[in-house]
Amino acid sequence: MADKKFNPLPGFGLTLGFTLFYLSVIVLIPIAALFLKSFSLSWREFLDLATNARALAAYKLTFGASAIAALANAVFGTLLAWVLVRYDFPGRRFIDALVDFPFALPTAVAGLTLASLFAENGWLGQFLVPYGIKGAFTPLGVVLALTFVGMPFVVRTLQPVLENFDRGVEEAAATLGAGRWRTFLRIIAPTLLPTIITGFALAFARAIGEYGSIVFISGNMPFQTEIAPTLIVMRLESYDYTGAMALAIVLMLFSFVLLAAINWLENWAGKFTKQ
Amino acid sequence: MSIELKNVSKKFGGVSAVHEVSFSVNDGELVALLGPSGCGKTTVLRMISGLELPTGGDLFVRGVRVNDIPVQQRNIGFVFQSYALFKNMTVFKNIAFGLKIKKWKQADIAARVAELLTLLGLEGFENRYPHQLSGGQRQRVAIARALAPKPSVLLLDEPFGAVDAKIRQELREWLVHLHHDLKVTTLFVTHDQEEAMEVSNRIVIFSRGHLEQVGTPREVYEQPVNEFVARFIGVMNVLELEVRGGIARAHELEFPNHGLPDGQRLRIGFRPYAVQISTNLKTFRYQAVLRHTYFLGVLLRLELELPSGLTVRARMTKEEFAHLGLSDGQSVSMQIRQYRVLAHEGEVLRPEVATTYDIPVNLGEGI
Amino acid sequence: MTASTQRRERTAASTRSTQESPFVKWTLIGVAMLFAGVFLLLPLLNVFVQAFSAGWAGYWGALTDEDTFSAIKLTLIIAAISVPLNVVFGLAASWCIAKFDFRGKAMLLTFIDLPFAISPVVSGLMIVLLFGAQGYAGEWLQAHDIKIIFALPGMVIATIFVTFPFVARELIPVMQATGSDQEQAALTLGASGWQTFWHVTLPSVKTGLLYGIILCNARAMGEFGAVSVVSGHITGLTDTIPLRVEKLYHEFNPAAPFAVASLLAVLALVTLALKTFLEWREHRRLELAPPPENLPPPA
């Protein structure tokens, strides 16, 4: 009776039991199935499948484009967050609400509309393509799509931090004679940086796994615009399950490493932003 | 007897939060559980309610052992420090909640709620939501909600903790009147000794999970059983004395040795009101300088410094102060009229039941 | 929540020394708006303009196409099964995580987040490996004539997987923030566990729950990668709306995929509108409630 963790609220056993059951059935067993299946491969087979030339080209594009897109989001997302938090201007609330649009819009639609925007006869393409900037069916298109899907991360991670930023610190810097630019570089930027890096990592992680929008905008040409998830689908469609599995394992291990890194980053950033 | 605790203990993990506590509350009493924060008083309250289970001892409510009765069936009114009002319900629904659970008839519920609204001065607020009420009103709703199902005892956790100082004073008086009208056995937790002294019939004093003293406000003030209680209730000058030449001494102050041989020590305490002061340096035995005067309203607190550097706190009324014509920096003579032995020393200082001793004024010329 | 009001007060109160010059300010706003315009506004407008590029008749024709209609139906069925299941899970998980202390809680939270970290394509693949012809349960399922892959059950499972964390993640912080005081108060008043949950807990996390449901639903209806892998792309049978968009796109019909996609864009806009509305209502409830002193005297 004398449980040291006595809690008068009922239902702990029931809810925890159901949670663990549902988690196991929906998430853990499928993940385990993937790893177990992959054990049927020998190490050599696995390496061959996971690192052949086409796979390497796909990784290169996936990771490269994801990194560039996340970087673009780090820069422009920070700017957007700053502008939305610090300034008042017509349409601010509308844009603020619209920042979540990439979360809400199915990625297939995102790919479809971006491909059409940057196509030769598209709204933006008609101006850009004559200058050699081709956004559709090129690696650039992959970057554009990944920038779109990752956009809310940096903005939404940074906004609360900026809102809670102690203006007194800036005022103190000003009273000590620091100019605005110096205050930003020396005082504001170092405080925000850990959060920006967290947002970058979140956008990067999201981009690595993205598939829906890329299908539409990249053209899926092997060695050129084929990302890793697309290659998995290609292999699946030709009933090459082991080949798909090997790639999936690589992607998933990478996701887990990123997840751990993001958890660590969030803790780290939390220390900087706690008042 | 409404509530009785027999050797009740509570351990969290390996840490003892409440250690073998025994006390009882009589029917219709208003009792304060007093102690510094983290002393286990809230844990005691929660164990009585059933929100926490004791790890040892027995709990009785109206003569029935309730250790194994779940919180729902203990028929106890509990007022949370945060009030814990149901945010999504109106005042009416908050108060009616316990009655609905007990499956009262709709008409009876309406009547009971109306009765409580009147009793607590909440008429007209029944359709408000908690966020539309002031702190004091929220507290009254919380009390009404707890009283609605006619509980056998009412438990309040820091009932005045969350309201500001001005309202707190009103609420104290209001609680006394409410208790007077309802006669429901009430136990409340507080860390504020003034509050406990003012409101309750009896006080249960805790420190570090131990029960230190149970008594009326007057008893715990005038006859504290040990140094903790003495220091916690009101202001007490505490001195450690050493017996030399048959006299117990601390700095220049001298007291009887209470039969202790030379070299032994004892602790004594005296209240500021027991210090007598005269501007005539010959009137009393000890010389002192008035260092600071603190105005507390009708009363003043004086800080006296003896030649050895020892500071003694004294107290007098505004009128006495004016009559004596005192000012900071002035030399005075002083005398301790009454003191209390708090602990004796054998080999080590050991607490014992304290006793009060009066010093006749004529002892001023020497013991 | 007070941030916007605080911001205005601060902006008004702060001296020029902590503000940028108007030139810098408006340049920053300009660049940010250009970025937001290209990546938020134009893609949104483009969907609708392209959708109507073949006129009303074309738009209507694309939407009332029989295969499109069956895709809409399938999407609704999948959402109608997967969202309620994730709601039940979210409520159970948030109850035990927010109201109780137990070992391994941090690990459980990480596990709940896992589906967000895994590529939807990989999620789909995992389900194929479990239930497909080559999978662990494949032979048994075939012997008992149960179709999971390339059929509704597989698509539902894939959808549940990718939308798994939404409701739980919204509810856990809300339930943690409200604490257990209200529940304990209900218990002292004699309420049972279920009564406490229904009358006290559920109403107090209503907004968070709605929020989670809206996000979960948007993702469930819009999921592409995971569903695509397990669907088999059988026109009129296992195409959801997003899959139908892809199929129409490959048919090189310029307006039809946009017409169907406009349904999803409307879904996204409704989701955003509901989300903004819920935030606004919560904000008003919490912050703009009249301070008690200023209330009119009770009637």
Image (spheres, grey):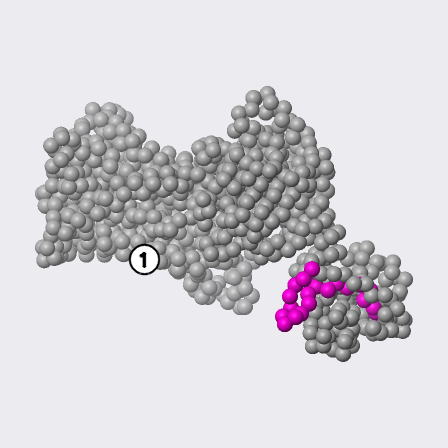
Does residue B342 belong to the magenta stretch?
A: yes
C169 left or right, relative to A222: right
Q: Locate residue C123: give its quadrant.
A: top left
Q: Which residues are magenta?
A: B333-353
Image vertical order of residue A150 relative to residue B334, above or below: above
User: Where is residue B175 shown, x and y percent of the image?
Assistant: 69, 40
Total tally of numbered discs in the picture: 1
Query: Is residue B326 in view from this perspective?
Result: no
Name which residue lies at 23% across and 49% down.
A142
Q: What chain does badge 1 belong to?
A: A
B300 left or right, relative to C106: right
* Mark 1 secondary-structure assignment: helix
| A49, A110: nearer the viewer | A49
Dot 1 corresponds to which residue?
Answer: A261
| C112, A17: nearer the viewer | A17
User: Where is residue C14 shown, x and y percent of the image?
Assistant: 56, 56
